[in-house]
Image (cartoon, helix red, strand yellow):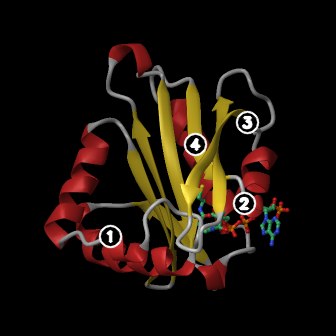
């Protein structure tokens, strides 16, 4: 099935909350556990509106009418950091490995390049998330730092948090 990618609107709030709950239950690589995510539809609508108001955006990927992937960008608000944004990305388990994550990222990088004054895209990724790290490296992101044992799982295992970045106007790899 063909994938369609578009910007999220507040009308997507219900679908997005259901999607995020599902993703958090599927993956060990997000900050929140599924039980920690309990927004109302109004909370989600507010978050969508605020993300755009603050200079960010949200991309959604659909297979037919099903929401299967999401990428959100947040731009820093303070003047001295307003050339920097960060993003989070996810694709439903059953749709992973088909290029949807890469396509969401390509669209995001194009969007960032067109945004006035934006110079740097940053992200945080768990050190055990090889798939995501490979995707980010393939698009030119480079490791900038590592917070040791920043993540502790319920079974007592730890992961480091790696910070990565892409400078969008002097990197030819995208
Ligand atoms: C990370 C994630 C968004 C990637 O999305 P995806 O749609 O599966 O990725 P793609 O199919 O576009 O693959 C992109 C690249 O990822 C890497 N990749 C994909 N599947 C992989 C696998 N099984 N093993 C290793 N690398 C893999 C490859 O570099 C691939 O590029 P290539 O196909 O040109 O070789 C997705 O796995 C996901 O949502 N994971 C759970 C949530 C998460 O970890 N989010 C990121 C938190 S920082």
Q: Is residue 171 left or right of residue 62?
A: right
Residue 114 in percent (x, y) is at: 52, 32
Compute the Cα span from label 4 to label 1. Answer: 21 Å
Establish if 42 lies above or below 149.
below
Residue of label 3? 143
Establish if 108 lies above or below 9.
above
Residue 158 is labelled as none
Q: Which corner quadrant of the image does residue 77 belong to?
A: top left
Q: Nearer the viewer, residue 130 or 9?
A: 130
- Whichever of labels 3 and 1 marks the residue nearer the N terminus, that label is 1
Q: Which residue of the protein is positioned furthest toward the top in this rendering?
A: 80
Q: Which corner quadrant of the image does residue 145 belong to?
A: top right
Establish if 26 lies above or below 150.
below
Q: SS of the residue at dot 1?
A: loop
Quadrant (top left/top right/bottom left/bottom right) for the N terminus = bottom right
Between disc 4 and disc 2, the foreground one is 2
Q: Which residue of the protein is positioned furthest toward the front in this rendering?
A: 156
Residue 128 is labelled as 2
Please report contact status of discs 4 and 2: CB closer than 8 Å, yes or no.
no
Residue of label 4? 123
Residue 153 in percent (x, y) is at: 56, 67
For the point 64% across and 28% down, which residue is it?
168
Compute the Cα span from label 3 to label 4. Answer: 10 Å
Mark 3 closeness class: few <14, some 14–19, many ≥20 residues within 10 Å:
some
Compute the Cα span from label 4 to label 2. Answer: 15 Å
Residue of label 1? 37
Mark 2 closeness class: few <14, some 14–19, many ≥20 residues within 10 Å:
some
Q: SS of the residue at dot 3?
A: strand
Tell me: is circle 4 under 8 Å from ligand 1.
yes
- Whichever of labels 4 and 2 marks the residue nearer the N terminus, that label is 4
Q: Nearer the viewer, residue 18 or 158?
A: 158
For the point 77% across and 38% down, which residue is it?
140
């Amino acid at each position: 099935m063909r994938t369609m990618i578009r910007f999220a609107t507040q009308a997507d709030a219900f679908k997005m909350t259901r999607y995020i709950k599902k993703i958090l239950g599927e993956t060990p690589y997000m900050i929140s556990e599924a039980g920690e995510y309990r927004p109302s539809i109004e909370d989600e609508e507010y978050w969508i509106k605020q993300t755009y108001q603050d200079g960010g955006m949200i991309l959604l990927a659909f297979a037919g009418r099903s929401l299967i992937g999401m990428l959100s960008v947040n731009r820093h608000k303070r003047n001295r950091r307003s050339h920097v944004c960060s993003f989070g990305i996810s694709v439903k388990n059953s749709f992973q490995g088909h290029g949807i994550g890469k396509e969401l990222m390509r669209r995001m990088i194009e969007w960032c390049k067109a945004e006035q004054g934006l110079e740097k895209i940053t992200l945080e990724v768990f050190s055990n998330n090889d798939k995501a790290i490979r995707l980010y490296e393939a698009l030119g992101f480079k490791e900038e730092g590592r917070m040791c044992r920043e993540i502790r799982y319920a079974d007592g295992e730890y992961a480091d948090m790696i910070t990565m970045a892409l400078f969008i106007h002097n990197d030819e790899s995208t």
